Amino acid sequence: MPREYPRIAGISLQTLAANVFLMKKLASIWQINGENCAAMQLDATDRRILRVLQRQGRITNAELAELVHLSPSACHRRVQRLEQEGYIADYVALLDLRRIGRATVVYVEIKLSGQSDEILDAFERDVARVPDVLECHLMAGSADYLLKIVAADSEDFARIHRRYLSRLPGVVQMQSSFALRTVVKTTAVEI
């Protein structure tokens, strides 16, 4: 005959203990980098707010509230929460590169002499100081890094190459590719 366990509100203590264990396990799983996953959930309204702000960063709160069907105060609270939780990293003005004389975009693949922390750290420290580098990505594949650089023209890129790129530590090979035309360009991600 199976053993009878004491019951609380009709539930056995064994079942309650198993549920407590499960809840503790789930709580530990739901922790990501010290943040609670529950706080990281976006509802449909949050997503609408983020979609609009990605494309219209200067929209007023009143206009945003109307577009997402909220009161202005509720909309403002949600935007503040999205900022505090890190969903909104920053607000910036995107410049027209042609208008400021920097229409040439060059992608540069970099291969380093090794993968030690010292070599990677030295490269990353120095490449961060190159004013013409918009992006630098550590890569998997044949190149170690991929840089996105803007220049006025090919002569300006030659200046950047001589003055900065050729002096980066640990570089054994570089391959530059000039963008002929931008087909798709957006800063908005699908939410």
Image: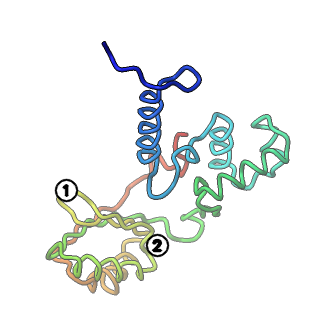
Instruction: Give the residue type at disc 2.
Output: Ala
Above-or-below relation of 40 to 145: above
Q: Position of residue 69 (x, y in %)?
A: 79, 34
Secondary structure under the numbered disc 1 in the rendered image:
loop
- In the picture, the disc for residue 4 is none
Quarter of the image holding residue 88?
Answer: bottom right
Above-or-below relation of 124 to 70: below
Instruction: Give the residue type at disc 1.
Output: Gly
Which residue is label 2 attached to?
152
- In the picture, the disc for residue 141 is 1
Secondary structure under the numbered disc 2 in the rendered image:
loop
Q: Of residues 181 and 163, which is closer to you in this image?
A: 163
Q: Of residues 77 and 5, which is closer to you in this image?
A: 5
Q: Of residues 137 and 167, which is closer to you in this image?
A: 137
| Left or right placement of residue 168 versus residue 19 in this view | left
Q: Position of residue 83 (x, y in %)?
A: 65, 57
The residue lying at 46 percent from left, 79 percent from top is: 131
